[in-house]
Amino acid sequence: MRATTPQQDFIRGVWDENPVLIQLLGLCPALAVTNTVLNSLAMSGATLFVLLGSSLFISTLKKVIPYEVRISTYILIIATFVTIVDMALHAQAPSVYRDIGNFIPLIVVNCMILGRQEAFASKRPVGRALLDALGTAAGFTIAMLMMGTFREVVGSGTLFQDTRWAFNVFGPNYEPWVVMISPPGGFFTLGFILLFLGWWETRKAQKREIRHWPHSVRVTSRKEAA
Amino acid sequence: MSDEIRKNGVAPQEGKEEKDLPHREEVMPKDHETYTPQGGGAGTGSGPIQEVAAVGDSRVESPKKKSEAVTLHLVGPEIATAEAMGLTESAEGGAGPGAAPERPEVSSSRLLMTLGLAGAIAGALLVFVFLWSDPLIQAENARILRVAINEVLKGPDHFEKLFVLDGELTTQVPEGADTLGRVFLGYDQDGNPMGFAVVADGFGFQDIITVIFGYDAGAAQVLGMKILNQKETPGLGNKIEDQPFVGEFDGVDAPLDGVKPDRNTGASNQVDMITGVTISSKAVIRIINERIAEMGDLLAAYEPSGAGPTGATAGGGSGGEEEDR
């Protein structure tokens, strides 16, 4: 196992291995509930709670859980936290729950969460596991907000809709791109974000690349080769 | 070069190409060479491990500091995925229960006990959360229903809950009896019945639409309508929730007749449908008509038991356990 510093454990999930933008995990919520900023934030909060809770428990109990039943135990722990968050959200924020309630139980099968447990929390000390959970949740939140902000601004012409800070971005005469708040809009948005990130990474790679003789032959980056 | 290999899926080309173009070896980074065979379609389950190992090797070998950093970054997800799938654990050989290469046999009773115990603890925890959240959820649902009844009956002073039982309306339900449904009878301040609030649902364009409507059984007139739940297309179908359409239902004679706005002759049973939202509009009208056809006689036959505020006042309705979704 590669040795890592606490900072690396945190920052890895935030950007370098961002669960949605780089690993392409947890796409179901990223596509389904990012039609407003508020919904994106609520889903991110729910995921943060589940990640932190299950990482804490699984990391603490890693010596107790037998290898053979570890996946079932992890799922059980994750499902418990998801059910708690489901009930709590329903009780505390019924209007948000109306919008995203159907997708809360699906956090159980979010491979981002099970992946962190299996790959990290089950092998590391509690503190590191919590840091990793925080970083992953932060990365998830960043991706969700990127999508949520774009889709809400373009698809509804508003920002922070359903909150007290709601305002019209383009004024009252804006005709919203309704498609952006419907499911296809989620795919479009994610596609364009990934396209942009890919282009950006490639450009960065090209700037660094060392030119050999003959200069006409370009060193292809790994991404291009793949 | 590697694009071609990928497309053709033929690994041996690699050797040929290298022979043909000897200078390639200099140009290509070292890691590229180790990478291509995998692209040639080895196609075994152990692929990710090999790949990760190859990347690790190349990182050590690579003399170019800068391109090394790029490579590392670009393969990030591959490492992460392999890690997530639990494939790299043995290669990395870390501590912990999952990573030990030779595990002692664990008795099945211990496995059962672990899972059983975990399940029991989780269950107990959820009971407490449920006990806390359920009253709040029920109260919220009751509040939503109360607001809806208030809206469709245009502000009753109070209302009472009636159950449909054996083809009759009754305020009391015998223990264990199956009720077919509920309606709410609203009274004005003087205790005169104002109309029934009836919940109905049926298929819309995408999913089931649930509406509540006020109905004056004596005059066979719809008093008002409100959508309780719908999943119609955002921006189109969900206009059925908005005021211009909802307002169409105030004081319309049953059975309703949905018409296009420019064909409205002013008859008392006509409801303007929304242009471009014909299916959802028709669905709402159909749902209401069907429920009136089903229950109209029953509601008309009901004699209010008395003017007394036996039912819930505006602050009551505590028993309204109507699901809101």
Image: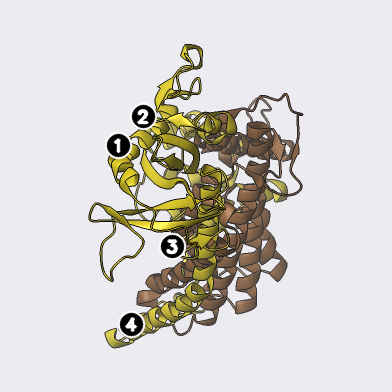
Chain colours: A brown, B yellow
Check whether the beta carbons of the residues at disc 2 and disc 1 lie within 8 A of each other.
yes
Image coords of residue B137 (percent x, y):
52, 64
Q: Is residue A8 visible?
A: yes
Instruction: Give amino acid for label 4.
Output: Leu
Depth check, mark 1 against mark 4: the one in front is: 1
Q: How many marks?
A: 4
Q: Residue at the spot x=63%, y=28% of the render?
A: A217
Q: Residue at the spot x=39%, y=54% of the render?
A: B304
Image coords of residue B268 (percent x, y):
45, 23
The chain containing the residue under callout 1 comes to B
Q: Which mark is residue B111?
A: 4
Q: Which mark is residue B87?
A: 3
Q: Which mark is residue B212?
A: none
Q: Which mark is residue B255?
A: 2
Looking at the rendered structure, the secondary structure element under dot 3 is: loop
Real-space CA distance between mark 2 and mark 4, rounded to the nearest whole angstrom: 64 Å
Q: Nearer the viewer, residue A111 or B227?
A: B227
Compared to B130, does A142 lie above or below?
Answer: above
Q: Horizontal placement of A105 versus A16: left or right?
A: left
Compared to A100, does B24 lie above or below?
Answer: above
Compared to B312, does B110 lie above or below?
Answer: below
